[in-house]
Image (cartoon, rainbow, N blue to C red):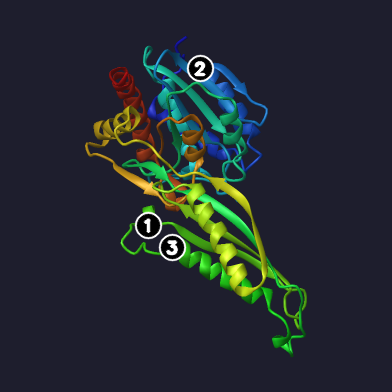
Amino acid sequence: MDSSITVTPRFSIKMLEKTLRLYTPSLSERPLAEFLSDKCDDLGFENIHIDEVGNLIATKGEGSPKILLCGHMDTVPGKIKVRNDDGYLYGRGASDAKAPLMAMLLATASMHNHSGTVVFAAVVDEEGNATGIKSLVKQKLDIDYAIFGEPSGIRNITIAYKGRIAINLKVNVGNSAHASAPWLAKNAIDESYVFINELKNSLEANQSNKPKGMMLTATLTEIKGGTSHNVTAIECDAVMDIRIPVNMNCKTVGDKIAATVQEVAKKQGVNAFYSVLDETEPFEAPHNSPLVRALTLGVLDIEKKGPQLIRKTGTGDMNIIGNALNIPVVTYGPGDPHASHTIDERVSVDEYLRSIEVFKRMLYHLKRLHGKSK
């Protein structure tokens, strides 16, 4: 059925304002899921349901291509007064990521029949442990393409995210000494720094000519050791966050970590072992895929200027879906990523409205280009 509501600019702004008035920190997204469920019904969506983890999923259209448009409902904590001021909408989630989420929903609501099938998903806990997206992957969706709604700016399409390995390194030196006679024992905190420096140096070597998006980085993010102010540490725990560019993979980086830890432990004569806390493969969408071309043309239609294709240094949901389903995935949406999580988070109303038009044009071009790619 066709929707009984016309998606006007005024309606689009009101819809975004309503979502901003619902405070939805991670794992408290239910009010927004229920609001979207009602709206999807009004806007002619089908198969509308809230799954067991709290994701709202709905479909519109039929046939090929099948595209997932996915955004997250949760925000970081902290309320911001919702206001429409001087061309900007202020509120927690305005940029990250309720404007991208609503732009995708409203573009889908306006899509023409025979444009293919859109699976719209509003997921939970993106800012937390990615409960929503992990659940979505397990549902084995039958899709050809996916776009994640995040603030990239209307003229930027994120085509790649780095992968990540996070490790917990535990160093144990066997005994301790009084701090007044530190020569009587090795110090686990000092030894940890030897491991950390060696890991950093071996992983980050020979990269001076690479752009940041293509660099392998290893960063110490947590360290704790010692039991008393006047006793040397027997044991020390350190967490390292390693980001992997798209021309590498977790296995080769993991092998290098294992070899380095083993080598340093032998050289220093201490016990060391590490556990992997997180492992996510890097991901890059093929630049010539119908998805990247359709979204590029959509931006060109509305902005009269081609977008920039960017590789981000972070790791995102598109890594999980892209690698699990082996399909082209990009991240796109209105908003300034630097405004995310800030105390005056906002989005340009004009950019938000233009992004709805970009998504509509993308769906039109994707239908055309998908047919040709077969």
Query: Is the residue marked by circle 1 packed among few (<14), some (14-19), or many (20+) residues within 10 Å?
Result: some
Q: Position of residue 179 (x, y in %)?
A: 74, 86
Residue 278 visible to an observer of this rendering:
yes
**Upstream in the sequence, badge 1 or badge 3?**
3
**Upstream in the sequence, badge 2 or badge 1?**
2
Instruction: Compare residues 245 and 256 and report the one nearer the observer.
Output: 256
The quarter of the image holding the C terminus is top left
- Distance Cα–Cα, label 1 vs label 3: 12 Å
Mark linked to residue 212: 1
Can you tell which quarter of the image residue 52 is in? top right
Q: Which residue type carries mark 1?
A: Lys
- Distance Cα–Cα, label 2 vs label 1: 42 Å
Left or right of residue 22, residue 319 in this image? left
Would you name the residue on which mark 3 appears?
Answer: 204
Can you tell which quarter of the image residue 64 is in? top left
Mark linked to residue 49: none
Would you name the residue on which mark 2 appears?
Answer: 45
**Upstream in the sequence, badge 3 or badge 2?**
2
Q: Position of residue 219 (x, y in %)?
A: 52, 62
- Distance Cα–Cα, label 3 vs label 2: 49 Å
